[in-house]
Amino acid sequence: MMTLIRLFLAVALTGAAALHAGGELRFAIRSEPKTFHPAMVADENSDTIRYLTHGFLVRANRHTQELDPELAVSWKTSPDGRSIRFRLRTGVRFSDATPFTAEDVAHTLRALMDPELRSPVADSLRAGGRNLDVVAHSSHEVSVTFPKPMAGIESLFENVAILSARSPLKEKAVLGPFVLAEHVPGSYLLLKRNAHYWKKDKRGRALPYLDAVRVEIVQNRETELLKFRRNQLHFITNLEADHYSRLLAENPAWVKDTGPSLDVEMIWFNQVANAPIPAHKKTWFTSQAFRRAISMAINREDLCKVVYRGHARPAVGPFSAANRQWFNGSLKPHPFDVKAALKLLEQEGFQRKGEWLVDKTGQPVEFSIVTNSGSRNRERMAALVQQDLRAIGVRVNVVTLDFPSLIERISRNFNYEACLLGLVNVELDPNAQANVWLSSSSQHQWNPNQPTPATPWEAEIDRLMVAQATTMQQSKRKAHFDRVQEIVWQQAPFIYLINRNVLLAVSPELRNIAPSVLRPHVYWNVDSLELSGRTEVSRR
Amino acid sequence: MRTGAGMKGARRVIVVVLLILLGGAASGAFLYRVPYDQQNRESFGAPPSKEHPLGTDELGRDRLARLLHGSRISLLLATAAALLATAIAGVVGAAAGHFGGWCARAFQVLVDLFLSLPWLFLLIMLRAILPLNVSPVVSLAITFALLGCLGWAGSARVIAAGVQSMHRSDFMLQARALGCRPSRLLLHVIPNLRPLLLAQLCISIPLFLLSEANLGLLGLGVAEPMPSWGNLLRELENFHAVSVNPWVLAPAVLLVTVVGCFHILLSGKESHA
């Protein structure tokens, strides 16, 4: 009899812990979203809320890295690459039950193009400063025409959240899986299930499975970790390596290393012609041999091992291997070779004078590297680079500055010598990096806003970037961008250091997760996520 | 209630502790000849061992060597900054207290201005406009010189008040009655300011130690690879590391001990007075 009762209890408890629809998913963001208007999103936290609440025509599948149809069931681009025609999903309704039609898509795109709105989302949709044309052919067919050919035209719509043309709620009427229900500034945002969400699972059950998502605002990483360990949060993205190791020691089931991310850390030298730095230093910084020698004197494996506790990979170029479509697999990181670095420098006229290196005019080789204060990883990397470069007789002064002062120096007065910073890659397509590579761009960090390219290789990069952006053939685009990566590897305007791995902490209660190296790493398939078991029980 | 003799004994103990710490900081780096900046990348974050009595930091550098060098740097330069601040405070405060009138009013405005400045932001701002390509030693000197140049106002106000009260004392009254000129009167004032200046110096040292620690914690203090108590304290940001490796608390213990000793010493002086 006792055995039977035990068996019954065991079955009952298993049942309680099994998968069930509903529940509240909880995770944290660092600070308040700056906007809830989907057309005005420019920061990561606002993008989180947009991702969870709004509907899009297409969306990149974080697993296959291909575009998935969402509100558009299919699309067709014109042979000249100037226009795209979407066939839209029928029977879809906004969260306030207003029907979704082609007029909503047209309304959204016209609203984005409105100069009064100053939407950052619209920048990528404006070709050569001119607006696009949008025509609703029927209630479920819409075409968009650009003033000039646009490669990868369909991926431009990945960040365009569709607004309702007719709903009195305006941008608050959404097509995504959740609706913003409550916002306590500085504390949390509560998103509730959208009863009118269009997606269903394979068995015909309405998605999302979750009842709600609570997005807490937690500035401190230690607090976030504590909340996760107390089961108050279901996952943490972008864990620090130290935190990862700590959780790994406590429970290996909590942590996941999903491999190298798209983000890259790098150093660049100031090559601005009128920068207020000594002329002999400008000569070093504009020398390809000098930049390559510095790159070869840096031990990237040590950066990965010491700073990231092994959870990083030596970086090769603007994209890591995580970008399967665009990464140039024929390139390898610059080798760590002190002798070869010294040889390159000797060929350029540098020589050792005692412990230190001097240039051909006898000037000691010394420069400063600026980085932002408060980033322990960057400060550690700078200290390691400082010691590495000492081995070739180069004296490096590491200077940490508060972020506004750093931006002032690297973007406005150019009063700096070298800078160590990171580049966050959100999108896979190289068009998203055009502002970094075009010599006329203000984001061309080593020498921005050039009226004409300062060097032949920058002119060649300009040509290739324009060619890949206007070529419709994918293989040609890939060839052009592969060549860009090769030039960047040879010339080393950016000395790429590492790609850090995406480290995650995920509660075992969270099911159907498919962690991705692309952002958002965990909740990209939020409508399929499920929770099991009771969530209030502390793990410790 | 503490007796006078007991207080005197406590002060002696405090002075001895401070001297030991100062002596240790001054000589330790010479006795323990391990480079503070040598990275051992195969042994980072290592626990205490025979080779590394306090273990190694996150870059594999000997923690004891960094603590000894950092203590020397922090104590020496905080004292230098306090001397600078006290010297400025002495000159400005004595002039304002002695000459009075428009000089005292201008002084009052200047002191109010300096005391109302958000010094942390001012330090960050000044540091941001300084030249970048300076060696860590120069950067260190600049950091403490800035602290000294910005931290004199409080002391100056106390000194000015001390000089004014001195002017009302009997010996000054007698000197004036005998026809002593104001410039000659100042010669009588200055030697009598010594205890006040000494007290202000003792107040300023822990203040500058804590200021440097604040800057260091923000990553805006002494530049790599130089150690100081401020940047050594950054290891405490990782709460877990503290509980697992309690020896990372060593710089915090030293900082608290030194600052505490100075405060007890000063409170002892106040009660004695």
Image: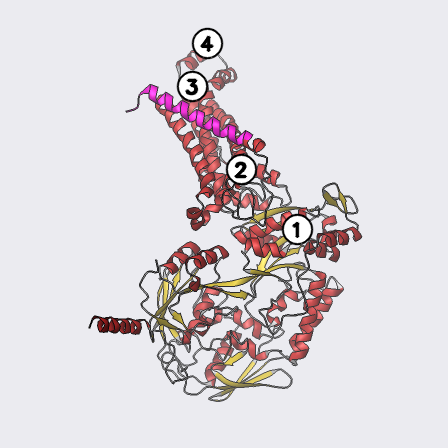
> The residue marked by circle 4 belongs to what chain?
B
Question: Residue B159 in the image: x percent, y percent?
Answer: 45, 26
- The x, y position of residue A40, in whole percent, is 48, 69
Sequence order check, earlier mark of 2 and 4: 2
Q: Tell me the magenta residue range.
A: B1-27
Q: As shown in the figure, which amino acid type bears the numbered disc 2?
A: Gly
Residue labelled with disc 3: B167
Depth order, front residue of A456/B75:
B75
**Quadrant of the image occupied by residue A132:** bottom right
**Residue identified by numbered label 4:** B178
Q: Position of residue A126 (x, y in %)?
A: 58, 74
The chain letter for the residue carrying disc 2 is B
Tell me, yes or no, if residue A347 can be seen here: yes
Q: Residues within 10 Å of mark 2 (few under 14, many from 20)?
A: many
Q: Residue at x 49, y 19 (%)?
A: B190
Q: Secondary structure at mark 4?
A: loop
Residue situated furthest top in the rendering: B178
Alpha carbon distance from label 2 to label 1: 28 Å
Q: Is residue B193 visible?
A: no
**Image marks 1 and 4: residues in contact by CB distance under 8 Å:** no
Label 3 is placed on what type of residue? His
Q: Nearer the viewer, mark 2 or mark 1?
A: 2
Secondary element under disc 1, as helix, strand or loop, is loop
Circle 2 residue? B70
| Disc 3 to disc 1, C-alpha distance | 56 Å
Circle number at residue A417: 1
Q: Residue B150 has which mark? A: none
The residues tagged by marks 3 and 4 sit, at their Cα atoms, a distance apart of 14 Å
